[in-house]
Image: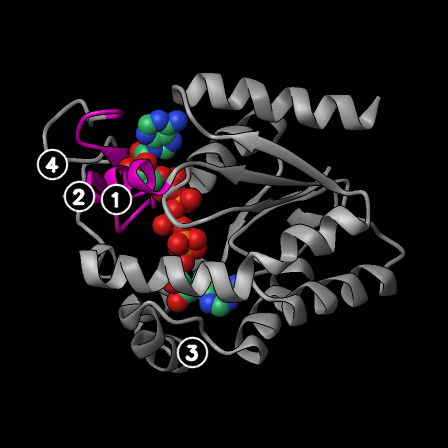
Amino acid sequence: MRLVFLGPPGVGKGTQAAKLSKEYGVPHIATGDILRAAMARKTPVGLEAKSYIDSGKLVPDDVIINIIRERLGEPDTKKGYILDGFPRTIKQGEALSKMLDQNREKIDRVIYFYLNEDELVKRIAGRWSCPACQKVYHTINNPPKKEGICECGTALVQRKDDRPETVKERLAVYRNETSPLIQYYEGQGLLSKVEADGTVDEVSEKVENAFQKSSS
Ligand code: AP5
């Protein structure tokens, strides 16, 4: 099972990928999480990525493609994975195809999540995440059991790139640089569209229906 989750910031890609990854026992590979972990450890990649992420811009393609090439070479990816936040440009999409071709592998499905912009902004404004285990919460829709504390016991934080002016930039970058991938994958017959409204469980059901319909 090799899935790509595509969609604007705050639509719920990470939430759905985490849930499905547990259910199907395949790794959830989120480039945003990998970059934030590198930033926290102050690695060379983390230091390079910081200014792009903090300003809502995309990290250069070559940096991201190398990260993914390395990650997809790890043994836990052999039975599949869910890619969340990659590819994000046509160049990244082409690089992914090449990597897969080299191993005679294919993407099974690209799930494209969509939602109106007001709702995206609300979801991002209420998001709190765990810097240790990366679990994501929402103050209203999905609050932690203990206020401000993750189930793993770590204090929750708000992402710096979730400030309103940066969110505006991220939405513009999504429209200009990432949304062309919708047509790219539609042209390859790989795209399933999922409206991401409703509860987390309702959206999961739509994702599973889209995935199962395409594989039957
Ligand atoms: P990244 O971390 O990938 O951010 P993103 O794509 O902008 O997506 P988000 O994490 O904001 O949202 P999401 O769709 O995962 O939503 P979530 O599940 O959290 O990237 C960050 C930055 O890293 C980029 O700007 C870029 O600089 C860099 N980067 C990353 N990948 C890159 C790449 N490939 N190339 C170049 N640069 C790259 O949900 C949002 C909130 O809504 C949560 O609070 C959640 O609890 C809540 N929620 C979820 N589902 C529901 C629901 N059904 N109902 C109500 N609330 C819900």
| Residue with the mark numbered 1 | 129
Give the CA distance from mark 4 to mark 3.
Answer: 29 Å
- The numbered disc on residue 45 is 3
Q: Are marks 4 and 2 in contact (CB under 8 Å)?
A: yes
Label 2: element kind: loop
Identity of the residue drawn at 20% across and 38% down: 126
In this view of the protein, can residue 136 be seen by the observer?
A: no
Lower position in the chain sequence, tag 4 or tag 2: 4
Amino acid type of the residue that numbered disc 3 sits on in the rendered structure:
Val
Amino acid type of the residue that numbered disc 4 sits on in the rendered structure:
Gly
Identity of the residue drawn at 33% across and 69% down: 53
Label 3: element kind: helix
Q: In the picture shown, does residue 137 fall above or below 78?
A: above
> Residue 184, how many percent across, how many down?
72, 56
- Say which of 173 and 103 sits in front: 173
| Residue with the mark numbered 4 | 148
Lower position in the chain sequence, tag 4 or tag 1: 1
Give the CA distance from mark 1 to mark 2.
Answer: 5 Å
Amino acid type of the residue that numbered disc 1 sits on in the rendered structure:
Ser
Along the horizontal axis of the image, is 124 left or right of 9?
left
Magenta span includes 122: yes
Direction left: furthest residue: 147
- The numbered disc on residue 41 is none
Q: Is mark 3 within 8 Å of ligand 1?
A: no
Give the CA distance from mark 4 to mark 2.
Answer: 5 Å
Label 4: element kind: loop
| Residue with the mark numbered 2 | 156
Q: In which quadrant of the rendered image does the N terminus lie?
A: top right
Identity of the residue drawn at 59% across and 66% down: 89
Q: In which quadrant of the rendered image does the C terminus lie?
A: top right
Along the horizontal axis of the image, is 18 left or right of 150?
right
